[in-house]
Amino acid sequence: MNEELRQTLKNWGWKLAAPLVFIGAVVLAVPTLFRKHGFRKREVLYYLDLCGVRSVPIVVLICVLMGAVLGIQAALQLRKVGTEIFVVDLVGFAVLKEFGPLMVAMIAIGRAGSAFAAEIGTMKVNEEISALRTMGIRPEAYLVLPKLIAMLISMPLLATIGDVAGVAGGMMVGVTYVGLPLEVYWERTINSLGPVTFLLGVLKCAIFAVLVSLCGCYCGFSAEGDAQGVGRGATRAVVSGIFFVVVADAVLTVLYSFVGY
Amino acid sequence: MGRHDNTPEIQVTGLSIGYGTRVLMEDLNFEVKRGEIFFIMGGSGCGKSTLLKHLIGLYEPLRGDITLRGRSIVNATEEQRLEIMRTFGVTYQGGALFGSLTVAENVAMPLEEYTDLKRAEIAAVVEAKLGLVGLKGFGDFMPGELSGGMCKRAGLARALALDPTLLFFDEPSAGLDPVSSAELDRLILDLRDRLGATVVVISHELDSVMSIADRIIMLDKTRRGIIAAGDPRELRDGCDDPGVRRFLNRDGMKK
């Protein structure tokens, strides 16, 4: 094998292995949370505010609209067979199982994933990552864990808010456009959606939180050393974030279907 | 200084560095003794900064070994490497301050991480270190509010926080005015004389080299190695290599 081919293969091998090495480093950094100053409360609160609190209005808006749109589409079809009452079930299940977690994940990719990549990429360009390492601090522990923890707390909460907003959107359509009485809509929602449906959706969102954070941070760490490199890193964080979230959603939906949900 | 065993502070043997197939330097061998002010020089793009990043353990060499106080940083495990890294201070070209922390918090970071000092004691050390680099009273500023030179000096204060006896400087005087640059030289001398610190500097600044360097090595891009080593004043006047003499005499304009 000639030298060039060997080097190309080696480069490709490294490209494939690097994300795994990164994930390994993050996992190995988890025990540092329990050391002195290991849990960086201030940073976690900062990211909770940035990725959680500040995302609430947009999550509510998008999920209300999504619930309403689903309601209208469902009503149009179900009206043909005179089963408009099932609008309630369709909206409820679609929002809790799919659209709530998925919309929250998409918003998080746009807000948090790209911000993580840009922040870490800029730190890399400014040699701040090198400075952390030569201070004997693991950048994965210092930079990734606070973001990951904040996302793991905020995204399930946002999904819960999104679920409520989505169902409310569907209810608006159900009451005004379809003509179902509010009490009927509410009762059917309560009866058809169980806590397990809700919890499985929230669990999905927690898994998306891990994917979005890791994609964002990894794309920041692998950004090349200039302003354009940081821009490309942020773009990659968004595109790869969407890709992995959708793939994970597909896998989880199939897995959930095996247990009957 | 003060310590009398003969292990060199830094020992580099058979070191080859580069990126992938692109070899920058081959078979480098040199050592830095305790208490020495050691400059690494060479034309732009010859790999000085890359060599520094190998010395401080950020990059893996292609071949060869680097030992700091007898401990190899190349063959160390990740945990050992982080431990070795804590024993020296590094200042980066742009200061590399953490933008989300104030200047004081930046300097306090290593103290919070590795000492049991109380909050008030940390604040006192931070103030003292900032005073040392001429930034007294700037503790509450954010790095973005400081000039380039001030960021650099704040970076130095952070590197000095744990009183390391081995210091690395990446282009410390680039972008500084002549007076600040001379002050920085004095500070480096003072650190060596007072703390017995060993200092490794990457620099083009001939004035600094001639006034404070004990020994230098010159790197060359085309020959991929060290083309001269020794006392810079002797090299300037009597090096066999005319290229080295030209470099140290600034372009050979002085006859």
Image (cartoon, coloured by chain):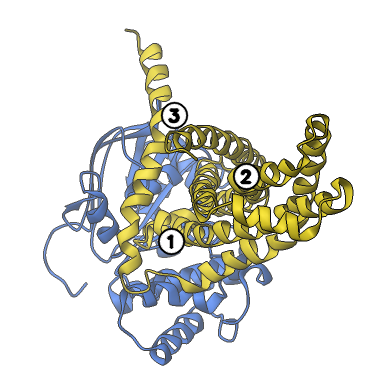
Left or right, A160 with reference to A23: right
Q: Secondary structure at mark 1?
A: helix
Chain of the residue displaying label 3: A
Q: Say which residue appears at 65% left-offset and 42% top-offset.
A: A94
Q: Locate the N terminus of chain A and report the quarter of the image it occupies.
A: top left
- Inspect the image, locate mark 1, and give the three-letter code of the amino acid beneath it: Tyr
> Does B80 sit left or right of B220 as displayed?
left
Label of residue A93 in the image: 2
> Which residue is painted at 57% across and 48% down in the image?
A121
Q: CA distance from mark 1 to mark 2?
A: 39 Å
Of the chain colours in the picture, the one used for chain B is: blue
> How many numbered dots are placed on residues in this image?
3
From the viewer's side, name the closer residue of A201 and B143: A201
Residue B120: x percent and y percent? 42, 92
Q: Disc 2 or 3, which lies upstream in sequence?
A: 3
Q: Which residue is mark 3?
A: A15
Chain for disc number 2: A
The amino acid marked with disc number 3 is Lys
Closer to the camera, B222 or A17?
A17
Q: Is residue B112 above or below residue B211?
A: below
Q: Is residue A3 above or below residue A37?
A: above
Tell me the residue that label 1 is attached to: A142
Foreground disc of the pair 1, 2: 2
- State if disc 2 and disc 1 touch (CB < 8 Å): no
Q: CA distance from mark 3 to mark 1?
A: 24 Å
Q: Which chain is yellow?
A: A
